[in-house]
Amino acid sequence: MRIIDKQLILNSWPKRCFDIFFSGVALLLLSPVLLLGTILSKIQSTGPIFYKAKRVGRGGIIFQMYKFRTMVENADKIGGGLTIHGDSRVTPIGRFLRFSKIDELPNLINVLKGEMSLIGPRPEALDYVKLYTNEQMKVLMVRPGITGPSQVANRNEELKLEKQKDPEHYYIHELMPQKLELDLQYVSNYRFLSDIQWLMKTFWILFFPPKEMSYTKKVDKPSAKHTI
């Protein structure tokens, strides 16, 4: 899948320079955490250290998004693309990696490669992107981000899906359009300084999460989170 009109693709050199510098520094400073993630991913169960998720990037180009594996080997063959809260495919170590967001640190490699940005629209799988309207396709004018407006607004996405009888239907018809609306606003009103603001908001949520995001929160009903 590829968007042909290259002139529609936004290309901000300050943004790209910031991405390269910040992701490079982050990989160096967070190397102990990356080492921890590597060890935990390896000892949790048999299987590879990284999970490579196929996502649609800028211009509609498919790329492999790197994450630390948090599930048992061949989890995608055991269940679907939605990860249910309490999903037996997720290991105990994997639950910690997901909550702490350590599993997403390998995304920094994608940033260095130019496939992602630090800030941008949420990277989606091709099956979901095929459902986009022509207007929603405009989010593919920029590189997808590790964090951004829709990611910050839906940090507790699994709680929003918790009471849904059909999480997949709710995600496609309710939640995904809401997230795309936020991402379209980001694309339309992009300013370099806004990336700094979204980065600060992300750090704030990571270090001072709302009470409903507590790792020890007990959930009686199954919920789902879109990503493996």
Image (cartoon, rainbow, N blue to C red):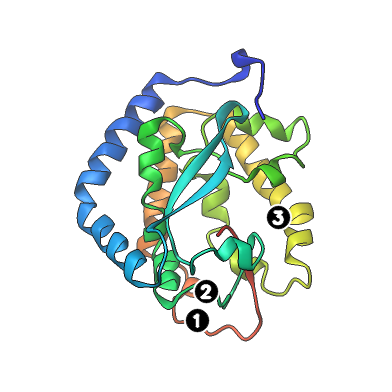
Label placed on residue 217: 1
Q: Does residue 189 appear in this view? A: no
Q: Residue furthest top?
A: 7
- Residue at x-position 46% and y-position 74%: 91
The residue that mark 2 highlights is 212
In the drawing, does residue 162 fall left or right of residue 154?
right
Q: Quadrant of residue 146?
A: top left
Q: Quadrant of residue 122?
A: top right
SS at circle 2: helix
- Residue at x-position 66% and y-position 15%: 5
| Labels 1 and 2 touching (C-beta < 8 A) | yes
In the drawing, does residue 191 fall left or right of residue 181?
left
In the drawing, does residue 157 fall left or right of residue 44?
right
- Please name the amino acid that badge 3 sits on: Leu
Q: Nearer the viewer, residue 46 or 214?
A: 46
Residue 49 pos. (x, y %): 37, 58
- Please name the amino acid that badge 2 sits on: Glu
Crowding at mark 1 (Cα within 10 Å: few <14, some 14-19, many 20+): few
